[in-house]
Image (tube, rainbow, N blue to C red):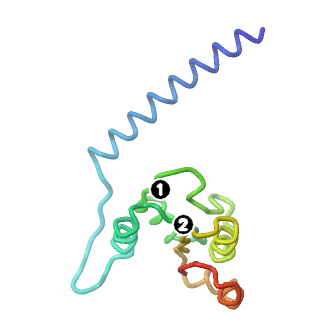
Amino acid sequence: MLPNRRWALAGHARRVSSWLKELDEQKQAFPLSYRTSGDEIAPQRAIQVLDELTGGEVIVSTGVGQHQMWAAQYYNCRRQRQWLSSAGLGAIGFGLPAAAGAAVGNPGATVVDIDGDGSFLMNVQELAMIRAENLPVKP
């Protein structure tokens, strides 16, 4: 029975792999876009610039809100465990404490929290701890 399960899993992995390849091709063919106006900087552009300036090598945390979606779409993580988000759990206030935890758990790494006003203010007191511990967190 076990060999049959292994075969089934291998087949599933091939199907998923080809689907992911197709999605990557679609992303290249039809990239996301956004509007710009005047002297304003679009949030999406700010996240793209962050990605360009850091080479996608920082650890990124996010709170909950539209900024979370933009960060997921416009910051290109290059490795595993680099993206910290509460995902679909809707935990407002997650970003800043997650960034602090990532900094403690990854000495020497730069950690950036991409957050919105409401989510950031839920745990703004964490700034005191970040300063006291001299953590390399960029809120």
SS of the residue at dot 1? loop
Check the image and report above or below for 36 versus 52. below
Amino acid carrying mark 2 in the image: Val
Relative side of 107 to 36, left or right: right
Give residue 82's position: percent from left, percent from top: 56, 58
Q: Of marks 2 and 1, which one's residue comes earlier in the chain?
A: 2
Give residue 45's position: percent from left, percent from top: 33, 71
What residue appears at the point 64 percent right and 16 percent down from the top-left corner?
8
Amino acid carrying mark 1 in the image: Cys
Q: Quadrant location of the N terminus?
A: top right
Q: Observer-nearest residue: 17 or 30?
A: 17
Give residue 99's position: percent from left, percent from top: 63, 72
Q: Which mark is residue 11?
A: none
Check the image and report above or below for 73 versus 40. above
Give residue 7's position: percent from left, percent from top: 64, 13
Q: Which mark is residue 77?
A: 1
Q: Residues within 10 Å of mark 2 (few under 14, many from 20)?
A: many
Q: What is the count of numbered marks?
A: 2
What residue appears at the point 64 percent right and 87 percent down from the top-left corner?
121
Name the image quarter holding residue 139: bottom right
Q: Which mark is residue 60?
A: 2
Q: Are marks 2 and 1 in contact (CB under 8 Å)?
A: yes
Check the image and report above or below for 78 versus 128. above
Relative side of 117 to 52, left or right: right
What residue appears at the point 64 percent right and 85 percent down from the top-left corner?
134
Q: Observer-nearest residue: 97 or 27?
A: 97
